[in-house]
Amino acid sequence: MSRYYLKQIENRETQHFLEYVKGDSKRLNKFANERRKYGFDSRETWSLDSTFYYWLYERLMMFKEKASEIVDLTFHKFEYKGETLTQIECIDRMIEGCRLFIEDSDTNDKEKQEKIKSVCEIWAIVIPAMWW
């Protein structure tokens, strides 16, 4: 599996995740059986918070590339903590928060933690418009 967008983030955590997703040869059959049965395997549930941020980051990156060619991502407006944000501003904030999590999920920086936390909050309000 390529993981194009994740490979653009060079850090220890990302490299660990990419290696972990490959799995060791002893468990590959188990994972393959789980993927056939469920469509995903148990590696994705081991650290579900990480899986979510990695999953969302990759999809937001592609969504931004593809959708921006087809639809006006400034059309929809959303209220978030007293601000009016366009869809593209929401996407950019979520990408930033996901990237911060991926780069340093154990950060003690309060500003970074707020941006990471905001990903789920923004996702909840923008999700109805996330199609093209």
Image (cartoon, rainbow, N blue to C red):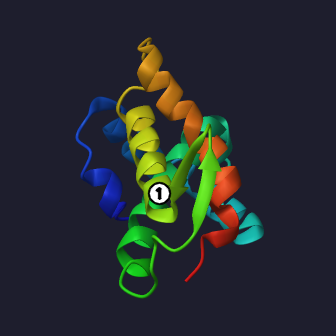
Image quadrant where one finds the N terminus: bottom left
- Could one spot residue 121 in this view of the protein? yes
Q: Position of residue 18 (x, y in %)?
A: 38, 47
Image quadrant where one finds the C terminus: bottom right
Element type where label 1 sits in the image: helix
Judge the density around disc 1: few (<14), some (14-19), many (≥20) Cα neighbours within 10 Å: many
Residue with the most extreme bottom position: 70
Report the residue at 44% width, 47% height from top.
Answer: 93
Q: Position of residue 96 (x, y in %)?
A: 39, 43
Q: Position of residue 62 (x, y in %)?
A: 40, 70
- Could one spot residue 30 in this view of the protein? no
Report the residue at 61% width, 44% height from top.
Answer: 80
> In this rendering, is residue 18 above or below 32?
above
Residue in front for this viewpoint, 29 or 110: 110
Q: Position of residue 99 (x, y in %)?
A: 38, 41
Residue in front for this viewpoint, 97 or 90: 90
Q: Is residue 121 left or right of residue 102?
A: right
Q: Quadrant of residue 13?
A: top left
> In this rendering, is residue 24 above or below 41?
above
Q: Is residue 52 left or right of residue 22?
A: right
| Location of mark 1 (residue) | 91
Report the residue at 46% width, 73% height from top.
Answer: 73
